[in-house]
Amino acid sequence: MNDFRGVSHQTLSNYLNQHLLGSEGGVNAFRAAADTWKGTAQEPMLLSLARQVMADQEDLQNMVHRLGYGGHPLKLTLSHAVRAVGRVNPVNLLRKRKAGLAQVELDVLIGMLNAKLAMWDTLQLVAGKDHRFDTALLGDLKVRANDQITQVKEIIEATWEERFFAG
């Protein structure tokens, strides 16, 4: 019998809240990347990705609250700090598109999305023994994460030459 009572609530709570905290940085990283690509065809794509990541963040937040793992004071304090740091865009401070840091910025976005995808994969495993999870939602979140990764790769494919080749 699948029984969620055997779950380590401390571990699961920490895991979910750590990803929720990381999602704050993710939303800000996409907004910062949109600033890097301001005035280009990539800006609306990155702003759309920021909204998509925010929707995923809301789904994760709802999941955390449904499970009864939300509202930790330290998490709330750290969220404010992450928001502030994210606005600075520490990966590409000068917001230059034709520099190696612009590529690093896009690489970091893919890394963040891969971390989110890994979380959804892990939660699907947990859901096999903890019936409190909405497995259909987890499946949808995985599809969304894969689509977001594809979107960033499309931006890279459309812009790599301007960074790595003169003229």
Image (cartoon, rainbow, N blue to C red):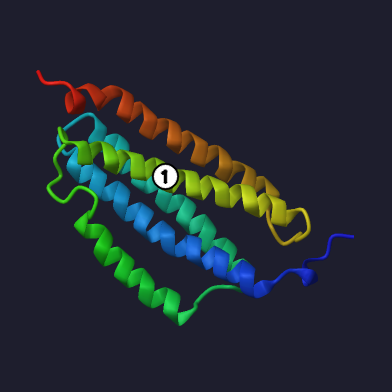
Is 121 located above or below residue 160 in the figure? below
Can you say whether 64 is above or below 127 in the image? below
Kind of element beneath mark 1: helix
Give the residue drawn at x 22%, y 29%.
41
Q: Residue at x 37, y 53 (%)?
A: 26
Residue 157 spot, x, y in % from top left: 32, 23
Residue 80, image quadrant: bottom left
Q: Is 86 displayed left or right of 8 in the figure?
A: left
Furthest residue to the bottom? 73
| Percent coordinates x, y for residue 73 in the rendering | 44, 81
Disc 1: CA contacts within 10 A as few (<14), some (14-19) or many (>=20): few
Q: In this orientation, which residue lies closer to the viewer: 1 or 52?
A: 1
Residue 119, above or below 4: above
Farthest residue to the top: give it: 167
Residue under pointer 1 = 111
Rendered view: 155 above or below 23:
above
Residue drawn at (38%, 60%), measured in percent from left and top? 24
Task: Name the side, left or right, on which 122 lies relative to 127.
Answer: left
Q: Residue at x 17, y 21 (%)?
A: 165
Q: Give the residue furthest to the left.
A: 167
What is the three-letter code of the residue carrying label 1?
Answer: Gly
Relative to 115, is 32 on the left or the right? left
Residue 16 placed where, x, y %? 55, 64
In the foreground, 47 or 14: 14
Q: Nearer the viewer, residue 37 or 55?
A: 37
